[in-house]
Image (cartoon, rainbow, N blue to C red):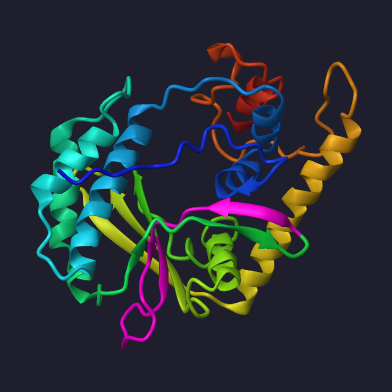
Amino acid sequence: MTAVIREDLSKRDPRERISKSFVSTADICGQKAWLSIHHPMPWTPPEKVTFGSAVDAGVEVIVKALAAGYEPDVVDAHKAAMQRVATEENAPDPDDVGAALERFADWSVVHEVVWPGTVTQPHLRLELPGIGEVDAHPDLLLPQGFEDPRVGTIVDIKTAARPKPANAAATSYTELGLYALLVLASGAGERPMSVAYWTYVRTQKPYWQEVVAPATDHLLTVARNRVAAVARAIEADAILNDGVSEPRNSVFVNGPRYGCGDCVYHPAAGGPCDIAEQAEEVAA
């Protein structure tokens, strides 16, 4: 069986280096990002998260085989996927994971890509001017130097209950945009030509969806400014709370864009968030 190894990212401190996950969290809910710095709590991933982790691992095994010029072994990919989540409390149904991987291997997009040269899970950790040290792991870097379609694309693998909107990749500043900045700065490839989400949509009739967009100057500029704003907020928070016994959130002030029900910091889960219930009342 092919094993898929992932670095333990749970201990990363954004005051030392910024991760893509922290930037995305701050974009979705500043309060949650702030609490993750000052009140970190253990978290039990729900099934929707462990399912995504399993599918991500299985897709990596399939892509590595394709990049090496071999026919992918979906059975081997499925074993690696389930091994990835074997210790999780809310492990996904193996049949559901297997179906997602079989559909990926049969997906028309997979048969259109020129795979040799593809890189899976590159670790990009470097200094970005005006931001500081940033750490991220894009799922796939499709190669430069081939003809269309999908030349030099940064791909993020997702699973979701609903399809992504048509503009999801073009407006993914704190995820795909950040990946593009890092690839460009790292020398891992020439300027990325496009960014894409490949999403397994878990509807009654599940399917894989591709949403792709050019890696434009606008995407890169907004991404740089969004990430720099998070870096400045981290610095300001450190100054404001230096030496205080009870830290206060004065800079990560944006509340949640989505529901708070499954957030580890929700009071119902024993968390210290003081805006979750108010945010839910406003949303209702």
The spot of residue 148 in percent (x, y) is 32, 85
Asked if the stretch drawn in magenta spans residue 150, the answer is yes
In the depicted structure, whether residue 169 falls above or below residue 116: above
Figure disc tally: 0
- Looking at this view, is 93 or 14 the one in front? 14
Where in the figure is residue 24, as x and y percent of width and height? 58, 47
Looking at the rendering, in which quadrant would you find the C terminus?
top right
Q: Can residue 202 be seen in this snapshot?
A: no
Task: Write the residue at 69% across / 64% down.
Answer: 224
Q: Specify whether residue 148 is painted magenta.
A: yes
Above or below 210: residue 115: below
Counting from the top left corner in percent of width and height, residue 243 is at: 90, 24
Give the left or right position of residue 203, taking residue 20 as reference. Answer: left
Q: At which x and y percent is residue 110?
A: 21, 67
Q: Name the image quarter holding residue 25.
A: top right
| Identity of the residue drawn at 89% across and 29% down | 242
> Which residue is painted at 58% across and 51% down in the image?
135
Look at the picture and state if 214 lies above or below 272.
Answer: below
Question: Is 70 positioned to the left or the right of 247 in the image?
Answer: left
Write down the region rendered in magenta: 131-155
Q: Nearer the viewer, residue 55 or 282?
A: 55
Residue 197 seen by the camera: yes
Would you say the magenta stretch is mainly helix, strand or loop? loop
Which quadrant holds residue 218? bottom right
Q: Which residue lies at the image location 34% right of the left edge and 77% below the top edge?
A: 150
From what the image shows, is residue 283 above or below residue 109? above
Quadrant, the N terminus: top left
